[in-house]
Image: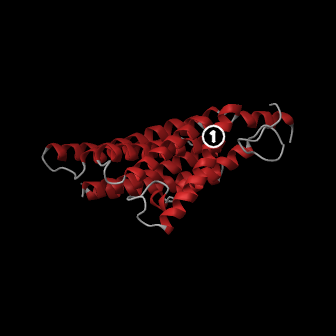
Amino acid sequence: MVDGLATTIIVIALLLAGFSGLMALLARPPGLVHLLGLTVVETALLAQAVVAIGKMFSGDRPETMTTFVGYLLTAVLIPPLAALLGVAERTRWGSALIAAACLVVPVMVVRLQQVWG
Amino acid sequence: MPAGTRLRAARSTGAGPGRLLVAVYAFFALAAGARAGWQLTTRWDEAPVAYLLSALAAAIYLVAAVGLARGGPVARRVAAGCCTVELTGVLAVGTASLVWPGGFGHATVWSGYGIGYGFVPLVLPVLGLLWLRRTRPDRSPGNFPNQVNHVQ
């Protein structure tokens, strides 16, 4: 896998998690910054997915294909779902929800790295 | 607290903190379910009991998520039942996995009190029960699913 890209995703997701958590503590609903942040995370995750799929087609395969593709798909789905749910909940809990989603993304990326082997 | 606030709160198990709770429950249903499904289909022979337990946990998470999201009197009771089963399960399996290491063959969602999932399986049912208690429509003491509450 691409270590640089994975690290970038983890750092951005954790920054957004910290920001969203702070906004939740300050009782602020999700705003434009949250959505922009989630867009950046999603773009990076899509880039990672494209690179990973490209690598798989060029013969470099993860040890357990199904698990890897499962994590890849789940990771890509998290930011859009978090944005939808976060916007639906226009209270501090919307921010908390986005923070929680942003904490799941690094876990998924780390699991992806491990599964790739 | 005015009765109106109580009534409105009673209907909204799926809003506010509840929406976060529903999201986490749904994610755990997906995560544990996908993993158990994959384990059951590809490596059934290795540890069927552990994988079936994980699949059961995933099914309970899914029912709890739907129950909390819907939030009617029946849905609340179903959600409370799920949370109780989860809490019992995570405590029982967690203790069993410590007393009897390797007893299940492989790790389950509830092994080591959910340590493989950041202890979320231990915290989730407690938060679920607290949230159901907080949003319950009546003020009578006790909030157990098998207890007959007065007519709502």
Residue at screen point 49% across, 39% down = A83
Question: The N terminus of chain B appears in which quarter of the rendering?
Answer: top right
| Among the 4 quarters of the image, the one containing residue B2 | top right
| Among the 4 quarters of the image, the one containing residue A6 | bottom left
In the figure, is residue B121 to the left or right of B10? left
Is A48 situated above or below B6? below
Q: Residue A5 versus residue B146: which sits nearer the camera? A: B146
Which residue is label 1 attached to? B79
Residue at screen point 45% across, 51% down = A104
Residue A49 drawn at (x, y percent):
28, 44
Q: What element carries label 1?
A: helix
Identity of the residue furthest to the right in this view? B2
Is B13 situated above or below A19? above
Residue A1 drawn at (x, y percent):
24, 54
Residue at screen point 54% across, 37% down = A85
Q: Residue B117 versus residue A18: which sits nearer the camera? A: B117
Is A15 situated above or below B1? below
Task: Give the amino acid at mark 1.
Answer: Ala
